[in-house]
Image (tube, helix red, strand yellow):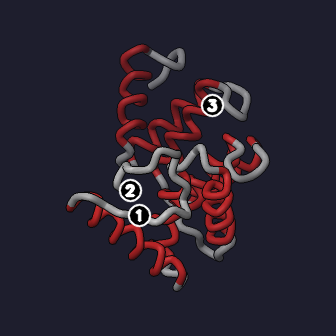
Amino acid sequence: FDGKSDKPYKTTDATNPINTYGKSKLAGEKAVQELAKDRFEPAEILLAEMLLEQRNKPEMIKQAAEILQRLAKKEKPDPKVLRMLADCKYAGLGMKADPDEMIRLLRQAIALGDGESAGKLAYCYEYGRGIAPDEKKAFELYKLGAQRRNAMSQFKYAEFLILGRPEGNE
């Protein structure tokens, strides 16, 4: 947008980028939307990410949730889809909050080899988010995430080792 409106912009307002960054961003967004219309999965995932960034726009959040729910039903869904859908389930973004379903989705993504989901589930166990706290399970999941090259898991695993958590870790 060019910033000339005296009212807040709506997603349906015409755009008018004023610089190269704005023009290239708009072109990229349009390309993603076109590819997503053709059900090109990487574009659909990127579109869902873009829509989820619009936290104050419920219609966009709902659209992202619908995309993720459809993609999660595939025979072998992309772990990133499961992880993003788990975030929606936890926070109630575009759907009713469901911590049990969040945990199930993270476990499914971990089974598909996802290190970031291991770190997220470890966090849930460490702090009791959606599941009963269990420091030993958190430790094991941070270790798994670290082995799968997830930076947050590597940091937390090292922190647990340095602090001697859980008691008597090896």
95, 15: nearer the viewer:
15
Which percent across, then down, holds residue 163? 41, 14
Which structural element holds mark 2?
Answer: loop
The residue under the point 49% across, 65% down is 47
Residue 129 visible within the image: yes
Give left or right: position of 56 versus 159: right
Contact (Cβ within 8 Å) of mark 1 with mark 2? yes
The residue under the point 67% across, 40% down is 91
Circle 3 Cα neighbour tier, 10 Å, few/some/many (<14 / 14–19 / ≥20): many
Q: Amino acid at mark 2?
A: Phe
Q: Amino acid at mark 1?
A: Thr
Which percent across, then down, holds residue 72? 64, 67
Contact (Cβ within 8 Å) of mark 3 with mark 2? no
Which residue bears the numbered disc 2?
Answer: 1
Give left or right: position of 122 versus 24: right
Which residue bears the numbered disc 3?
Answer: 125
Which percent across, then down, holds residue 155? 36, 30
Q: Mark 3 or 2, which is nearer the eye?
A: 2
Using the numbered discs, state the Cα–Cα distance from disc 3 to disc 1 in whole angstroms. Answer: 44 Å
Q: For residue 126, which numbered disc appears in the image?
A: none
85, 168: nearer the viewer:
85
The residue under the point 51% across, 51% down is 9
Which structural element holds mark 3?
Answer: helix
Which residue bears the numbered disc 1?
Answer: 15
Please tell me which of labels 3 and 1 falls first in the chain.
1
Please tell me which of labels 3 and 2 falls first in the chain.
2
Q: Which quadrant of the rendered structure holds the C terminus? A: top left
